[in-house]
Amino acid sequence: MTQTYNFNPGPGPIPNEVLAKAQQNMFNFEQTGMAVMELSHRSAAYERVHFHAMNTLRELLDIPDDFSVLFLQGGASLQFSMLAKNFLSDNKAGAYVLSGSWAEKAQKEGAAIGEVYTAAASSNRTYADVPVFDPADLQENTAYVHLTSNNTIYGTQLSDWPACEQPVFVDMSSDILSRPIPWDRVDLAYAGAQKNAGMAGVTIAIIRTSLLDQASGSLPPSLSYKQHADKDSLYNTPPTGAIYITSLVLDWIKEQGGITEMENRAKEKAALIYDVIDRSNGFYSGHADKDSRSWMNITFRLPSEELEKKFLNQASERGFTGLNGHRSVGGCRVSNYNAVPREHVEILRDFMLEFQQNHS
């Protein structure tokens, strides 16, 4: 079989060791004669998976005791409306920092539920940087500040976490488990699992427990963070298979050396590609400003769309997949998630150098 180098932006790759273990155990879990997906979510066998995943996540991210860990469904996109539904009460407004398309969508869904406003935006610069704002300028009626920590489409990443008096909610779908989270400055972090935390189907939400009692009292139970927290994310049938894969991914991260090791690897791998871009004399031009560059998603253009097409076609012939930029912006994108091996990045680097040499 031809070697595949998976740089898809999401769903992203899952570590080979995890896939091998899942293949070995998933379909006859703990000699029950049943696959994980067939187990009752009330059974002792599944509960071991469920709470192991929660506890390992708490350990890896050093989550304080006064935070609740939730496994939800609906993807990060449902969180756009769910957090607004929980916390946008009458006479309160959600403040959104617009750093890319996903932040725009989060604000749009919040606006369907209550009052929202833009705290800062870099849309006038084609989202080439992460906008900075002064927390002192937030409206007095601000219920929360919404941030997007990493922008997959534009290749930018938040590095300076603001200190706000208001609760700070962060979409971390594309960089969770790749770096530490400053819990003194984050009150709710959420992420779809399919980039760094497993497979599509489960959404992680980590919320300061004191916020649960502040949520709107008129919520349907299925949309209530408090309801899911009180039931240990077992209020309804959870995505058991996806949570099992997340559990294995978390074990893998722990075995590799934890979040610090993931962060170091991400920076080292990304530096290999950024170095090619910076030394190419403009043949490859990065989209993001250097001080806003993402370690997870590296976006760049070539001198012409014709050359970009040739680059992507030849890359595909070599076994690279997922290098197309998002359809809304074009260009090229390298997604550098935890499970992408360094040697695959080195092979891509060599291909980029070869392509430049052949077409300069």
Image (cartoon, helix red, strand yellow):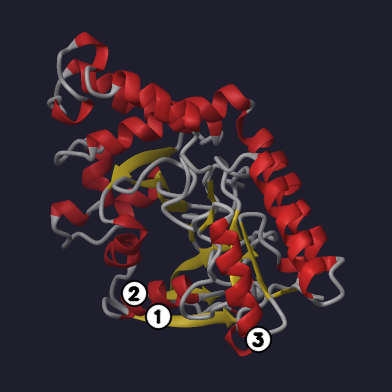
The x, y position of residue 259, in whole percent, is: 62, 35
**What residue would you read off at disc 1?**
116
Quadrant assignment, res 285: bottom right
Per the rendering, the mark at residue 110 is 2
Quadrant assignment, res 154: bottom right
Furthest residue toward top: 31
Q: Earlier in the sequence, mark 1 or mark 3?
A: 1
Q: Residue at x 62, y 90 (%)?
A: 124
Amino acid residing under circle 3 = Arg
The x, y position of residue 126, in whole percent, is: 61, 84
Question: Badges 1 and 3: C-beta atoms under 8 Å apart?
Answer: no
Q: Closer to us: mark 1 or mark 3?
A: 3
Q: Secondary structure at mark 2?
A: helix
Q: Earlier in the sequence, mark 3 or mark 2?
A: 2
Q: Secondary structure at mark 1?
A: strand
Amino acid residing under circle 1 = Val
The mark tally for this picture is 3
The x, y position of residue 215, in whole percent, is: 29, 58
Amino acid residing under circle 2 = Gly
Q: Earlier in the sequence, mark 2 or mark 1?
A: 2
**What residue would you read off at disc 3?**
125
Work out whether residue 310 or residue 289 is closer to the camera in this orientation and state it.
310
Please state, as top left, top right, bottom left or bottom right, where the C terminus lies in the image: bottom right
In the image, taking residue 257 as reference, residue 16 lies left or right, namely left
Above or below, 36 against 89 in this view is: above
Per the rendering, the mark at residue 240 is none
Q: Closer to us: mark 3 or mark 2?
A: 3
Above or below, 143 against 233 in this view is: below
